[in-house]
Image (cartoon, rainbow, N blue to C red):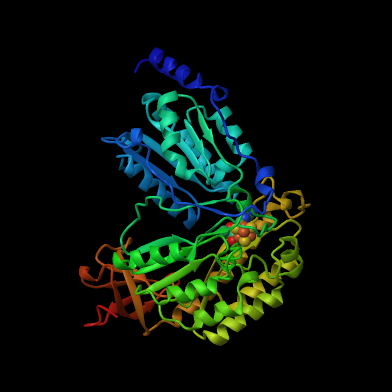
């Protein structure tokens, strides 16, 4: 392509004007308003007839950022695109449609996305027919959408977390109009069932149990980007898990921003997360996990169900965020350090071999050295197997953004380092306890670091690498730990123990 052609193409792309079509833009202010309206269960998803074969002979690529919820949304979008005839590719140059499923939880994740979108501009210049789309949590933010429309003119399609089921129609508009297509609903109310899914692998599966969050922790953008809390009907979840069991899946992870609030929105029944787990226990699938828990909604009924064990694994991800009461109050976490520790002790009492992991934010606005030390001490007191640690990132539209922050970035970084050192120390000590133990490993495939070895996870999510026959993949085997490292364990398979 010569200089002139390149110039013309650039002009063609730039001529896309967003005001020529109906734009439904996001609004954090609207998202904040929680109505009392009932949840609609929409089971009417169909691929429009005229779109059925639109992707035949074409390819799609989805880049996923952020949490498991996003990973699972990508599986749904893959399902929709496959139903349209598209095939998956991992090469941007081969793709006819490229979607970025984005995360808005921290600023650095957003910057990475902007960087990557920028890198796609030459590709769009060379192949103007490729559709570039942005979806996920970032597209729910007005500031992001405005920036995309203004500065990233090569983006064709922007749609929100509540608009995924509209992908066929939105894609149709993008293909036909050559204009920017933006559809982001700020208000939701629906649970959409029957969406197609292409799951990654046949061993572990994600299952949504609820969407959205009503907790409004002051630092968090999720209640605005994912909307109000709404639970799927128990029967839909149970049927999905039964189907996965029939298909041979070995593990299910139940997903929700706050799984412990499951069912609180039901108007016609009293049915909690504990009730759901109790029913799922009876399904013949070896492992059931869930994420994420909010300590405030973790009740005794749930502890009692988990204590029954079986396919409910004894690993609990229980974000604490801070060990200091004043900070917890500013974060609006709605529990105290003492209440959190009491919960952990109640769980430990009923499930003595339970393992805990957590999320922690350091450098919350105004956090003092003493307050930070309370976080260090709670880490020691609980003895987490591992922790996800973050420096507080101000998110536009959240209450914490307005809080005075006199903590210099240097201090925040050094606190993160100190915190990570402590977490690593505890993780290493906990790992040593595995030496010579026999553990059950769900084998997922060959080790990423050494393709002579197999690798998989224990019930408590500890990574194990070991020599063994390929037939073990997809099965649960018993492995004796021969070497305990901080982040993983090496072991040897115990003969004649392929199926536990
Ligand atoms: N800054 C830093 N970390 C955050 N998290 C959520 N919002 C922010 C923020 N603004 C962390 C919390 C949460 C995890 C998913 O991300 O620890 O549990
Ligand atoms: Fe964010 Fe708090 Fe909801 Fe978790 S519980 S998604 S941290 S608002």
Say above or below: 96 vs 420. Answer: above
Residue 337 figure quarter: bottom right
* Residue at 60%, 35% in the rendered image: 25
Give the quarter of the figure containing the C terminus.
Answer: bottom left
Residue 90 in sight from this viewpoint: no
Say above or below: 408 vs 500. Answer: above
- Judged from the image, the quadrant occupied by ligand 2 is bottom right
Give the quarter of the figure containing the N terminus.
Answer: top left
Decide if residue 75 is on the left or right side of residue 19.
left
Of 171 and 434, nearer the camera is 171
* Residue at 61%, 76% in the rendered image: 299
Looking at the rendered structure, the number of numbered marks drawn on it comes to 0
- Residue furthest toward the front? 268
Say above or below: 18 vs 28. Answer: above
Say above or below: 444 vs 20. Answer: below
Residue 299 in sight from this viewpoint: yes
Residue 416 figure quarter: bottom right
List x then y, in percent, for residue 314.
47, 78
List x then y, in percent, for residue 384.
55, 74
Of 179 and 40, nearer the camera is 40
- Residue furthest toward the top? 4
List x then y, in percent, for residue 324.
72, 69
Decide if residue 137 is on the left or right side of residue 340.
left
């Amino acid at each position: 392509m010569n200089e002139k052609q390149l110039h013309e193409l650039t002009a063609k792309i730039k001529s896309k004007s967003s005001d020529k079509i109906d734009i439904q833009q996001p609004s954090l202010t609207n998202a904040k308003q929680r109505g009392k309206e009932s949840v609609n269960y929409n089971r009417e998803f169909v691929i429009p007839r005229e779109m059925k074969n639109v992707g035949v002979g074409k390819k799609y690529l989805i880049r996923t950022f952020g949490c498991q919820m996003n990973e699972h949304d990508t599986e749904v979008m893959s399902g929709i695109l496959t139903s349209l005839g598209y095939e998956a590719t991992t090469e941007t140059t081969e793709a006819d449609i490229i979607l970025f499923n984005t995360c808005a939880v921290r600023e650095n994740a957003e910057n990475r996305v902007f960087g990557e979108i920028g890198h796609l501009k030459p590709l769009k210049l060379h192949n103007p027919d490729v559709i570039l789309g942005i979806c996920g949590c970032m597209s729910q933010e007005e500031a992001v959408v405005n920036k995309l429309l203004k500065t990233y003119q090569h983006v064709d399609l922007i749609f929100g977390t509540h608009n995924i089921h509209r992908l066929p129609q939105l894609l149709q508009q993008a293909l036909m109009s050559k204009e920017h297509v933006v559809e982001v609903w700020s208000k939701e109310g629906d649970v959409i069932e029957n969406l197609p899914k292409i799951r990654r692998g046949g061993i572990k599966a994600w299952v949504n149990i609820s969407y959205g969050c009503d907790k409004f922790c002051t630092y968090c953008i999720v209640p605005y980007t994912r909307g109000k809390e709404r639970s799927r009907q128990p029967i839909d979840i149970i049927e999905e898990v039964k189907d996965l069991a029939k298909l041979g899946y070995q593990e299910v992870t139940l997903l929700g921003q706050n799984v412990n609030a499951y069912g609180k929105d039901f108007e016609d029944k009293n049915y909690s997360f504990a009730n759901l787990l109790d029913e799922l226990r009876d399904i013949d699938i070896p492992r059931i996990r869930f994420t994420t828990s909010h300590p405030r909604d973790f009740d005794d009924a749930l502890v009692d169900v988990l204590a029954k064990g079986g396919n409910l694994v004894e690993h609990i991800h229980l974000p604490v965020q801070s060990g200091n009461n004043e900070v917890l109050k500013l974060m609006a976490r709605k529990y105290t350090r003492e209440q959190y520790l009491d919960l952990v002790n109640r769980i430990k009492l009923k499930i003595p071999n339970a393992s805990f992991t957590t999320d922690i934010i350091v450098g919350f606005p105004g956090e003092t050295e003493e307050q930070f030390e309370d976080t260090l001490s709670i880490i020691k007191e609980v003895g987490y197997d591992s922790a996800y640690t973050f420096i507080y990132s101000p998110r536009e539209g959240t209450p914490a953004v307005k809080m005075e922050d006199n903590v210099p970035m240097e201090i925040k970084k050094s606190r993160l380092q100190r915190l990570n050192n402590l977490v690593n120390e505890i993780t290493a000590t906990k790992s040593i306890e595995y030496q010579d133990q026999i553990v059950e490993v769900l084998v997922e495939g060959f080790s990423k670091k050494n393709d002579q070895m197999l690798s998989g996870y224990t019930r408590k999510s500890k990574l194990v690498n070991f020599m063994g026959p390929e037939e073990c993949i997809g099965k649960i085997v018993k492995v004796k730990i021969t070497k305990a490292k901080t982040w993983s364990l090496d072991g040897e398979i115990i003969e004649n123990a392929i199926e536990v």
